[in-house]
Image (cartoon, grey):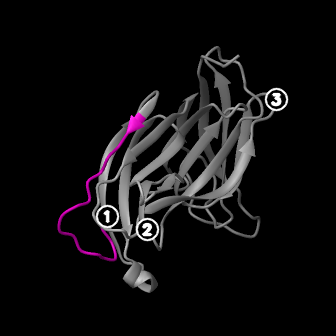
Amino acid sequence: MRWNGTYTVSLAVITAIVALSCSGPELADGGSATDVGYTVAGSVKDSTNSPIADVEVVMYRNEKHTTYKISMSLPVDTAHTDSIGAYYFDKILNGEYTVIGSSPSGEEMAILKNVSINGDAQFGSMELRAGAELTGIVNVDINDPVYIVLKNTPYIAKVDMSSRSYGMPQVPLGEYAVATIILDLDNQSTAKVHGRIDTITIENGSNRFNPNLNGLFQFTDSYE
């Protein structure tokens, strides 16, 4: 039977793990920041406040992709919740991250975008809900490779140029900056791109996004 409720994931950024021989700037909670990194901890519970074991939680670092010229999420580490619904990551360096949780069945998921790790204690929460589908048709009159990318996430789809269609079968609900990117085949060594960014909201069920890339444009090194 499919779970019809929601799970809640709490994220806490705790103090830095500090080597005894090192010291750094003092944190508000009395820790010290070094390049050893920080511990990120949290828990997963359902709508009745009961802990959920074996939830996969993946932490991604957001960095600008050298080919697509947009910030995407690269996996850093994966954790699973224990019998009391707790998980943690350690040695997480300063930076901006995205955290994605998936229920044991894989049907419920959630995303926490733009988590800034800078040495201060931070908290966030997200509810695991049924993921949704994103599909569409790209209106473009050239045959260079086209990709749909959800910024600061690991979600990317290559457009089938024979039908101009694409699909992402399982995406967490929420608002996203979506990039439609054309790679210039004549300049692969320099990774020239043309792209546009729109804002979309992924809701329950099937979602459609049909970007129009026709008209005058110029391949560049960046478009954000």
Asked if residue 112 is among those painted magenta in the image, a careful observer would answer no
Residue 28 visible? The answer is no
Q: CA distance from mark 1 to mark 3?
A: 45 Å
Mark 2 closeness class: few <14, some 14–19, many ≥20 residues within 10 Å:
many
Label 3 environment density (alpha carbons within 10 Å; few <14, some 14–19, many ≥20)? few
Front-lying residue, 185 or 14: 185
Give the Cα distance between marks 1 and 2.
9 Å
Quadrant into which the C terminus falls? bottom left
Task: Please state which amino acid type lies under the numbered disc 2.
Answer: Tyr
Identify the disc placed on residue 83: 3
On the picture, is 38 further left or further right than 179? right
Magenta part mainly helix, strand or loop?
A: loop
Name the secondary structure under disc 2.
Answer: loop
Label 2 near label 1: C-beta < 8 Å?
A: yes
- Where residue 169 sits: x, y (%)? 54, 41
Q: Residue 58's spot in the image, x, y percent?
A: 65, 48
Between discs 1 and 3, the one toward the N terminus: 3
Instruction: Name the mark nearer the viewer: 1 or 3.
Output: 1
Is 189 located above or below residue 90 in the figure?
below
Q: Which residue is mark 1?
A: 195
Q: Quadrant of residue 60?
A: bottom right
Q: Are marks 1 and 3 in contact (CB under 8 Å)?
A: no
- Where residue 11 sits, quadrant-wise, is top right
Which mark lies nearer to you, 3 or 2?
Answer: 2
Q: Viewer-proximal residue, 73 or 41?
A: 73
Chain part drawn in magenta: 207-223
Task: Read off the residue under disc 2.
Answer: 68
Going from N to C along the chain, the mark reached first, 3 or 2, is 2
